[in-house]
Image (cartoon, rainbow, N blue to C red):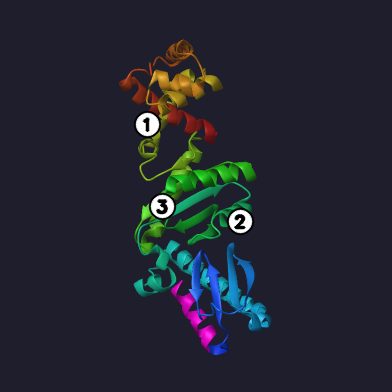
Amino acid sequence: MYSFYKFLEELYLNTKIPFIVVLDDKKFVLSDFDNCDKVSLEFEVNGKKGKIITQKEYESCTSLLRYLIENKIKEVSNNKEKLIRKALNGVTIDKNIIHKELGFLKGDFYIINVYLASNLQEGLELVNECYGNKNIVSILKEDNIVIIGALEDVDDHVNSIRDSIDSNLYVKCYISYMKLNNINEIKEAYEINMSKINLAIKYDLDEVIYGERDLLFETLVDSIDEDLKMKMYEDFGLGFSKLDREMIKTIETFFKCGLNISDASKELYVHRNTLIYRLDKIQKCTSYDIRNFNEAVIFKIAFLIWRGKEISK
């Protein structure tokens, strides 16, 4: 924003046209003309809405001002995107350049990966519409929309992104996010986010939003030696293959609710006794009672491995 203000100052000094620009809820006052008749011209560029205000006698100049200001906004936006792409590719960005071009990232900020199997460009346009007046950068990288910005309540933001994609594009998305305070760490953060999304796809996880502390269990399971995975798959495969979709949903929900029968029955909209009946049935098919913590841990590891193998067939 600093470079944009310097541009406006130079524009005023070179043209001698008094004007005020309102952009992103910020007002840039280049001349004081409170007691004069005014005209205004609204504009929109890169999802950002703004307004140019000048004296009535300079009304014929507003289109020229709009043209110059819109081009500068596009240039500033392109510079931000180029720097973010460099950082994502592991290029170290100088602190002075960060301060000048990416000042909105000088404190804590978030990197958010949004994975879509299709409609990627439409997804990016949707994100830009949602954040038109916010200081964020959103770009495409591989099969991801990458969003970088200083967000106050990241949980609200990621849930809003998921809901917007669900209701407008009707495609499944996976979202992973991480908090940072150094732009030169975003390459590693991007890769960590992507690894979580890859795990979620590999094991067809029910949840689609992952923070920094999520999927630690799945990461550990995925690191198990392949020979041991195959042995567990063969040992448990017969029992798991007897479970229908309703039983699998019951297992997922029971684990999600921390092995709490009351919470799981509410989540499944079934009577407590119905859930107990299903858990008994699961025990009969697999020989494991997932109401018992120790057995539940072994069961969950084996179930995750079995599911990953079945999906990869």
Q: Amino acid at mark 3?
A: Glu
Secondary structure under the numbered disc 1 in the rendered image: helix
Reading the image, the residue beneath label 3 is 152
Q: Amino acid at mark 2?
A: Glu
Could you tell me residue 84's position as x and y percent? 46, 65
Could you tell me residue 63's position as x and y percent? 67, 78
Indicate whether 6 appears above or below 188: below
Looking at the image, which residue is at 53% across and 54% down? 145
Q: Earlier in the sequence, mark 3 or mark 1?
A: 3
The C terminus: image quadrant = top right
Toward the right, the furthest residue is: 60
Indicate whether 3 appears above or below 131: below
Q: How far separated are the C-alphas under marks 2 and 1?
A: 45 Å
Q: Earlier in the sequence, mark 2 or mark 3?
A: 2
Looking at the image, which residue is at 38% across and 63% down? 183
Q: Which sits in the foreground, 197 or 98?
A: 98
Tags 2 and 1 touching, CB below 8 Å? no
Secondary structure under the numbered disc 2 in the rendered image: helix
- Range of residues picked out in magenta: 1-13
Reading the image, the residue beneath label 2 is 125
Secondary structure under the numbered disc 3 in the rendered image: loop
Viewer-nearest of discs 2 and 1:
2
Q: Amino acid at mark 1?
A: Leu
